Amino acid sequence: MMMNKDATDKQGPDIVLIGAGIMSATLGMMLKELQPDLKIEVLERLDVAAAESSDAWNNAGTGHSAFCELNYTPEKPDGSIDISKAIKIAESFEVSKQFWAYLIKNNIIELPTSFIKNLPHISFVWGNDNVNFLRKRYEAMVKCHLFDDMVYSENHDELQDWIPLVMKGRDSKEPVAATRMDLGTDVNFGALTQSMFSHLQEESGVKMHFGHEVRKLRQMENGRWRIKVKDLQTGDKRDIYARYVFIGAGGGALPLLEKSDIPEGKGYGGFPVSGQWLRCVNREVIEQHEAKVYGKAAVGSPPMSVPHLDTRYINGKRELLFGPYAGFSTKFLKKGSFMDLPKSIKPTNLRPMLSAGMKNMALTKYLIDQVRQSPLERVEALKDYFPDAKPEDWKLEVAGQRVQIIKNDPDKGGVLEFGTEVVSGANCTLAALLGASPGASTAVSIMLGLLERCFMHRINTEEWQEKLKEMIPSYGQSLADDPALLDRVRSYTSEVLGLVPAVEKK
């Protein structure tokens, strides 16, 4: 029997979350904690949660806190170091840890050791110019209390203790330097995402639909969104009606934003970049390295190319990866279609995309060179960080897809962006997250911004304010401006998450 439109509207969810990744999981958890009676439906085209960018094997960075990522601290023309982005990211990561601690403390998700572990974050460089850069970076960063546990060394013997694989076989006369933050962590965002969705599935008013693909999005006259969905297993199609829609579908967000037809989404384009890793398959080598060691990107290469020798904890096992090596694919998702890029080109974004392409020929050349690399050339790049690396100990693995934002600019035509951005309609009933790094690590701050923008009528109520401060004790205050508050927050999250504060590890 067919229901009339009004009856269907009344039975529809309050919120539809498209994509079962870390962003949708975070928003869903926050909303259900803030207002338990909300009805939420999650639509995911794959058969499991966190199978794309949130998966540990696909995620290029786990635990971005700006301790060691040199691309977040560029050198200005006058030679000084700009640490403003690093401060913002470090503060955002502290906000994320507070929300995770709330979930642990209230027995909402499983034990913290399954997704977060202490792991030193180390920046490592060689050559006089790079050593001078790292020294200036260190001097600038330790002036901010977010980084005052950072230590610096140019001593070969000390660095041998920190990173034996990196130093073994290296010329003792070569100028080298490193910074170290013991407060660093490794985060398995795949495990975290699945834990949050496991809890959400048990909550009343929450429905999860795997193997469901969104085909169309349209806002109706009454303000609700009609979402046409196809069950990929049965082929059945149906309509879902919702008050709010969040598109957290990673690389798939741009095509869905275009389908929504909101004016604010016009003019955006996407540039897909695939990633690859060298994965160590020798357990003896893996056990000799326990740190995230980030270097400096080669001159002329994009920010996404920052190399790192990276310890990970995945499915209970310690792993070692090196990369990323970039590649090019027209897919917007690892399990997407080669037609994703061609289909995303519209009259409204053609000019920005062409303009951005013309201005980023160096990126195109870089991607071509990366794709053409031989296995031996990849190992040679690895040897900059692990001089004694042997080809037989490493296996090439394909990581996830990233889609970098191309924005329309009235003056420049098109600008390629390397961050994340939330795009929402004028009435704030639909929002989409575009872009990539630092992504997952700053998910809680990004979702707080979305709540403040799209739920203005509720976020300032006494109930929501009280709950937000329970979930995130520093909410409404600046950790970057208040050293005492940061100390309290770090002590609290370290205790609840089972992390050892840096001062105790020294």
Image (cartoon, grey):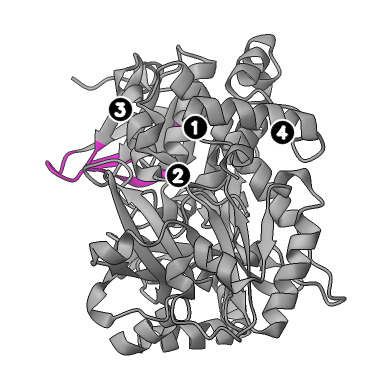
Horizontal arrangement in the rendering, residue 176 relative to residue 138 (left or right): left
Q: Residue at x 53, y 36 (%)?
A: 500
Q: Which residue is mark 4?
A: 486
Q: Secondary structure at mark 4?
A: helix
Circles 2 and 4 in contact, beta carbons < 8 Å? no
- Mark 2–mark 4 distance (CA, rounded to whole Å): 30 Å
The type of residue carrying mark 2 is Gly
Q: Which residue is mark 2?
A: 248
In magenta, the rendered stretch is 210-236
Near-viewer residue (59 or 204): 59
The type of residue carrying mark 1 is Leu
Q: Is residue 226 magenta?
A: yes
Near-viewer residue (317 or 424): 317
Q: Which residue is mark 3?
A: 198
Q: Is residue 126 above or below residue 401?
A: below
Horizontal arrangement in the rendering, residue 252 relative to residue 474 (left or right): left
Q: Secondary structure at mark 2?
A: loop
Q: Which residue is mark 1?
A: 27
The type of residue carrying mark 3 is Ser
- Mark 4–mark 3 distance (CA, rounded to whole Å): 31 Å
Label 1 neighbour load within 10 Å: few <14, some 14-19, many 20+? many
Q: Quadrant of the C terminus?
A: top right
Q: Sequence-wise, which precedes: disc 4 or disc 3?
A: 3
